């Protein structure tokens, strides 16, 4: 099949999805979080958390209905920052933001993009695939793991997140969803240890998220 023909078909498919989304999204229901994030636990396993907040202007930009931001530490000084943004509906233009777009605005550059898996005790295959970013700012490095936790799915692709959003708005009349982001610094250049810390925390986190984010 000629490449130009494939591109035409792809463009037509995207246009049809956009038209369907526009038509059906207005019918989507508003789905509140299963529990308010103000009750999110501040102790997760050996990790003790201290809740924080962004500036209000950031929340105004994000458009979330509920959220949780905290810094968790262990006694041996492992650190993980967690942010969860929950949207009751994305029908009014308040869409989930990707850190690939917002992190460079704060001075961090995306040096590498890949994937990791986190064990999820309540998942059928017991593994959840998530997106991994390596961020750099001068000599500093951070590792980010993030995913879209929406309507019973753990989604590791911005593109599939949008496709599922359209499909669920049509067939389930739902556009609720959430974004989960974990960040930890790279200490002494040990990126593998930073990833391990995030995955250890994420494994404990997954079942808790299911209590707050509607399936």
Image (cartoon, helix red, strand yellow):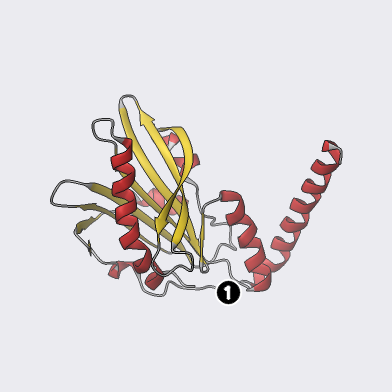
Tell me the quarter of the picture where residue 172 sits: bottom right
Q: Residue at x 44, y 35 (%)?
A: 105
Question: Which of 91 and 117 lies nearest the eye of the viewer?
Answer: 117
Residue at the spot x=37%, y=30% of the render?
A: 136
Judge from the rendering whether residue 206 lies leftward or rightward of residue 39; answer left or right: right
Q: Is residue 173 above or below residue 45?
A: below
Quick one: SS at disc 1?
loop
Position of residue 90 in the picture relative to residue 77 (left or right): right
174 up-or-down from 186: above or below: below
Viewed as shown, does residue 43 lie left or right of 68?
Answer: left
Q: Toward the viewer: 189 or 89?
A: 189
Who's the residue at 40% across and 63% down the image? 120
Q: Is residue 63 visible?
A: no
| Residue 55 seen in the current view | yes
Query: Circle 1 sits on which residue?
Result: 29
- Residue 31 screen position, x and y as percent: 50, 73
């Amino acid at each position: 099949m000629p490449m130009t023909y494939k591109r035409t078909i792809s463009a037509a498919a995207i246009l049809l999805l956009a038209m369907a989304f526009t038509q059906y999204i207005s019918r989507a229901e508003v789905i509140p979080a299963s529990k308010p994030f103000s009750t999110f636990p501040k102790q997760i396993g050996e990790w003790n958390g201290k809740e924080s907040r962004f500036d209000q202007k950031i929340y105004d930009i994000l458009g979330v209905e509920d959220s949780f931001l905290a810094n968790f530490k262990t006694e041996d000084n492992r650190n993980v920052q967690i942010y969860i943004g929950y949207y009751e509906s994305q029908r009014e233009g308040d869409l989930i933001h990707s850190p690939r777009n917002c992190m460079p605005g704060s001075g961090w550059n995306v040096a590498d993009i890949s994937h990791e898996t986190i064990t999820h005790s309540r998942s059928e295959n017991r593994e959840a695939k998530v997106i991994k970013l390596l961020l750099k700012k001068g000599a500093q490095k951070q590792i980010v793991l993030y995913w879209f936790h929406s309507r019973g799915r753990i989604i590791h692709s911005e593109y599939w997140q949008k496709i599922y959003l359209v499909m669920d708005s049509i067939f389930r009349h739902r556009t609720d969803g959430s974004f989960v982001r974990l960040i930890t610094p790279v200490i002494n250049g040990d990126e593998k240890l930073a990833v391990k810390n995030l995955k250890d925390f994420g494994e404990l986190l997954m079942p808790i998220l299911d209590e707050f984010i509607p399936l």
